[in-house]
Amino acid sequence: MEFQAPRGTTDVLPDDQGYWRYVENTASQVAESFGYRRIDTPVFEDTNLFIRGIGDSTDIVEKETYTFKDRGGDSLTLRPEGTASICRAYLQHGMHNMPQPVRLFYLCPNFRYERPQAGRFRAFHQFGIEAFGESDPYIDAEVIEVSWRFLKAVGIDDISLSINSIGDMDCRPKYVDALKTHYQNHSSSLCPDCHRRLDTNPLRLLDCKIESCQPIIESAPKGTEYLCIPCNTHWLQLQEYLTEVGIRFNVDNTLVRGLDYYSRTVYEITPPTNRRTSVIAGGGRYDGLLEQLGGPATPGIGFGMGIERVIENIKRLGINIVAESKLNIMFAHMGEPAKKESIRLSSKIRQLGAEAFVGPSRGLKSQMRYASNMNASHTIIIGDDELSSGTYTVRDLTSGDQSEMTADGILNFVKDYDNSHRVN
């Protein structure tokens, strides 16, 4: 073929659409059960929003954004993550004047130019939530619980939670100084990226994946030992609240996340592979971010998780997402009058809220094979004899049962079909 999907992108084919609807519907249900409401933002934003929000020394802004100038000369960037856009919308629409906390969730596509690998794409989709206007650590525990309960709800049980606190602007500088001193003592062993991060973004030193840097990370000072009294109180209360809701966790002192805006709480949820590259969900607190974007001082916290990676884990575990059957009728027709009747009746059925379609203009056996291919639950066979008698053959493709019904009888059958068997 001359054309293929661009590298790092993927087509969601019909056979996979069920996974996507299952994940999106479950995400909405779980988020709404905690009081979160959906928000959608533009797929591109002013480039400066991400420079000021994410940080110009992060890998995302330095290497991974899709940035371009439009015909008016404005610099725009395809959204690489959800939080900065939600913060912009929160400020622009005066949500800081609403009763706080404001709870929001989103399902959106994002774009990053990075090396494609399993579960990681250049065009990918995220489920995320953001909570604004509450500094109490109960909201930190709530945000973590939303992501935890969602993963449990879609059947992903084999997960572990890692948490850490990276302090705030009062206590973090002392920790950063200690971290820089530690790394300067090992400068000859650092990879090129860590040499750069030592000057531009020291916390990201702990996030390095290069094997030669791992012993340096393991012997590095721990951020939780440098927390000021308010940050330490927040940190201890978070652990108490997670225990209250029955969520087990590990303290990971090397966990920092990849964006500049984080403060205090950071966390990640992973499957049993226990590798950072397999993280399903991650997030944390970003007090001060809204100030950087020109708004009032407002605490915030949220998470993001890749939908592609969630689906990858659902498939890995062999989770059956089709719990119920649904009514899906194909009309098999023989002759032009029968085709017209099939078109008329299938339209009536769709207006009742069920699925119905007309088979291809081929022989009956070929049409029945097509019905099986399309996962039809029933076929209605119409030919000259059926038109003359006014009764049509209705075949249940699951049980093999067959009956005769009039056109009105078919419509009543659809109306009376047990709602518990329908997938909305």
Image: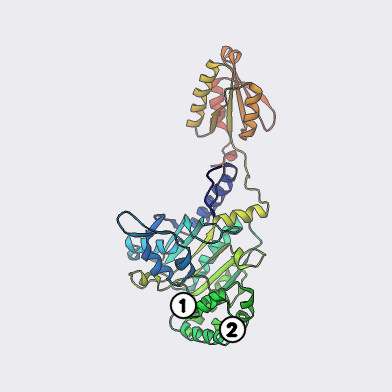
Q: Which residue is mark 1?
A: 200
Numbered badge on residue 188: 2
| Residue drawn at point x = 51 percent, y = 73 percent | 265
Pick the front one: 187 or 45 = 187
Image spot of residue 232 (x, y percent): 51, 82
Decide which of tag 2 and tag 1 comes sooner along the chain: 2
Neighbours of disc 1 within 10 Å: few (<14), some (14-19), many (20+): few
Q: Is residue 166 visible?
A: no
User: Left of 229 or right of it: where is 371?
Assistant: right
| Residue drawn at point x = 44 percent, y = 73 percent | 135
- Looking at the image, the residue that sits furthest to the right is 400
Image spot of residue 110 (x, y percent): 47, 57
| Residue drawn at point x = 56 percent, y = 31 percent | 416
Image spot of residue 286 (x, y percent): 44, 71
- Looking at the image, the residue that sits furthest to the front is 2
Q: Amino acid at mark 2?
A: Ser
Quarter of image, res 324: top right
- Looking at the image, the residue that sits furthest to the top is 388
In the image, is residue 4 above or below residue 368? below
Pick the front one: 68 or 58 = 68
Pick the front one: 196 or 418 = 196
Callout 2–callout 1 Cβ contact below 8 Å: no
Q: Is residue 219 visible?
A: yes
Q: Regarding mark 2 in the picture, which secondary structure is present there? A: helix
Q: Name the front one of labels 2 and 1.
A: 2
Image spot of residue 140 (x, y percent): 50, 70
User: Left of 42 or right of it: where is 185?
Assistant: right
In the image, is residue 60 above or below residue 329? below
For the rendered model, the colour scheme is: rainbow
Q: Amino acid at mark 1?
A: Thr
